[in-house]
Structures are given as structure tokens and as C-alpha cells.
Image (cartoon, rainbow, N blue to C red):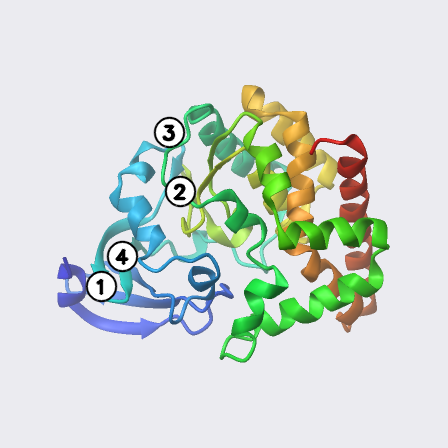
Amino acid sequence: MTGYLDSAVERVPFGDHVGKSGATLERVLLADGRRVVVKKLSPATDLVMALTGDTTGREYEVWASGLLDRLPAGLGHAVLDGWREADGAVLVMRDLGDTVLTWEDRLDRAGCRRLLAAVAAMHRAFLGQPPDGLVPLPVLIDSFAPDRVAPYAGGPNPLPALVLRGWEHFADQVPAELADPVFALLDDPAPLTTALAARPCTLIHGDLATVNVALEDDRVTLLDWSLPAAAPGAFDLARFLAGCSSVIDATREEVIADYRELAGPAYDEPALRLALLAGLVWLGWNKALDAAEQPDPRIRYRERADRDWWLGQARLTLDAGLF
């Protein structure tokens, strides 16, 4: 179904969108005056697809399955239409304009609670009955493993080279008693994924970040459903903290406390401990890279403190003997 593009009168590439995967986005003006966003899903251009073994357009499949229409009230998606193509798929989405958060936007605690409340409602709604056929949890945990990223380091996307350099910094900065378990899990995430899967699981978004959120008047809308998985809800929380704590005007402990309250039965303390370790395995390279290479000394100091917080959480999880 390509009717949306058949009626296009203007197509403008999204040259400045905040995603780092390389996904191709266009803003399209339709003949009836509506504006939509068209997203091309192809592993040839989308690094996340390539790294996670997505050859057909998982984000399209999630929408086509009807899963996004089962989200609880107050939590929405933006997809209007989609179709398969020979090298992947295409999605047509509502153009949400400036309701979509950017890395320049900050969330105060109330705004963060609003987002967490909508996500926690999803975690409660699917608790104990996550859908089948989602992203395997090991793929989410080790998607930035050096061996997985290295084949793409010479390509047009600069991210793989940054990831590899970040893990080099991680090895230099982090004591062996913490670095060695992290690198072991990058090589084989099975012990961590088995422990996570044994906790109460639900549907998670898998890439919860402010830049994948639109705060509309009547709902929170989540974008980029390319990495949904069956996992404890705390996995979303940990990914959110790992990627976005620098743009949230609340402490990590306050964000965790708010999620604990909002999630209710979907909150599980051992799962949080495991998810925080998984967050470091996923983004430890970035913590170390920023701690070493940020040119602004104030930001570098902040990022070193952030790195040390995550290392402290990893130590707690490892000492707890949860896997």
C-alpha cells in the first residue's frame, strides 16, 4: 500500500534527525494538506537493524501484528500505514512536530513521572503475558559488543568506531573485578539473560529514551518500536537511565523511586539489580568514552560521576549473586 506516497506533493529528507542508527526519514506533504513522516527500514542503511539481525523491518512487523493497538490508554504510537519492500519495509507515521523531545529538551521530575506512568501502565498491562516473536533478550544486551560492532567500523556510520574506542577506554578506566564480568557478558550474555527471564516479564519498548517520546496533550507517544522484547519492566527503566539521566532534572534514585511507585506489581527489585547491570553492558562504552574525551571539563566531570554510579550499581548486582 503506497497510497500515501502516491499523493505526495513534497518530500524533504530528515537530514538532522537525532537518531544515530542511520535510518532514512522523510517529511512528506500530502495533496490533502496533511504532513506525515516516512521511515525506510533497511539493514543496508539502519545500523540497529544490522546489529540486531533484523532483515525484514521488525518495526513494521510489530505494527502489522496489531500489537501497538493493544497499548493501554494514555500510551500511543504514531504509525498510520506500512508495507514490505524487497530490502525491508516502509512506515508512514503522523508528523508529531515539536511534541517529539530532542536532546536539547529537559524533563523535570513531573514530566519524567508522566512518561514513566505511561510506560509503567504498559508494563502492568502485559505483566506475565508478553507477546511472542519479539527481539531476543541477548540481542538487546550485547548489541554493542565489540565483536558485533567491529565489522561495521569502516562503514559510513561513525558510531561503530566510537563504540570500539569507548570499550578500549572502559578497559583502561575500570578495575578488572568489574571490567572482566562486563566483557564476559558481552562475549556471552546468557547468564544475565537467563536471570532476567526468570523474573516477572512483560512487554518492554527496548529503546526507551527521551528522543523516542512525543508528549502530546492527551497521551504519551512512543516512537521507534524496533527493539521490543519480553523482559522485566525494569529493563526499560535501566535503558532510560543509562541514556537520558543527563537531561532529567531529577536524581537517578528519584527516577527509580517514581518508577517503583508507578509500576506497582510490575516492579521487581532483583530485576532492577539485573537490569542496571545490563544497562552498563549495553552502554558502558559510552560512559567511558565521555569520561575520557568530552572536551568540556564540566561535562567530563559529570560523565565520570555517571560512569562511577553505574560501576557502583554493577558491583552491587555482582555481589548480590543473582546469576
> Gap between marks 2 and 4, in whole Å?
21 Å
Quadrant of the frame with the N terminus: bottom left
Marks 2 and 3 sit apart, C-alpha to C-alpha, by 22 Å
Mark in the foreground, 2 or 3: 2
Q: Residues within 10 Å of mark 1 (few under 14, many from 20)?
A: few
What amino acid is labelled 1 in the image?
A: Glu
In front: 301, or 100? 301
Q: Tell me where residue 300 appears, x and y as whole percent.
A: 80, 64
- Secondary structure of the residue carrying tag 3 is loop
Amino acid type at image mark 4: Val
| Label 3 vs 4, first from the N-terminus | 3
Taking 134 as reference, is 142 left or right?
A: right
Closer to the N terminus: mark 2 or mark 4? 4
* Residue 306 visible in image: no
Closest to the observer: 37 or 204?
204
Residue neighbourhood size for the residue with mark 4, other residues' Cα within 10 Å, grouped as few (<14), some (14–19), many (≥20) = many
What residue does disc 1 label? 85
Residue at label 4? 92
Question: In the rendered structure, which amino acid carries the disc numbered 3?
Answer: Ala
Question: Mark 4 or mark 1: which is in front?
Answer: 1
- On residue 73, the disc is 3
Where residue 203 sits, quadrant-wise, is top left
Label 2: how many Cα within 10 Å (few below 14, some 14–19, many 20+): some
Identity of the residue drawn at 48% across and 65% down: 21
Graded by Cα atoms within 10 Å as few (under 14), some (14 to 19) or many (20 or more), the crowding at tag 3 reads few
Numbered mark located on residue 134 in the image: 2
Q: Position of residue 109 (x, y in %)?
A: 65, 38
- In the rendered image, residue 163, in percent from the top left (x then y), is placed at 63, 67
Give the SS element for disc 1: strand
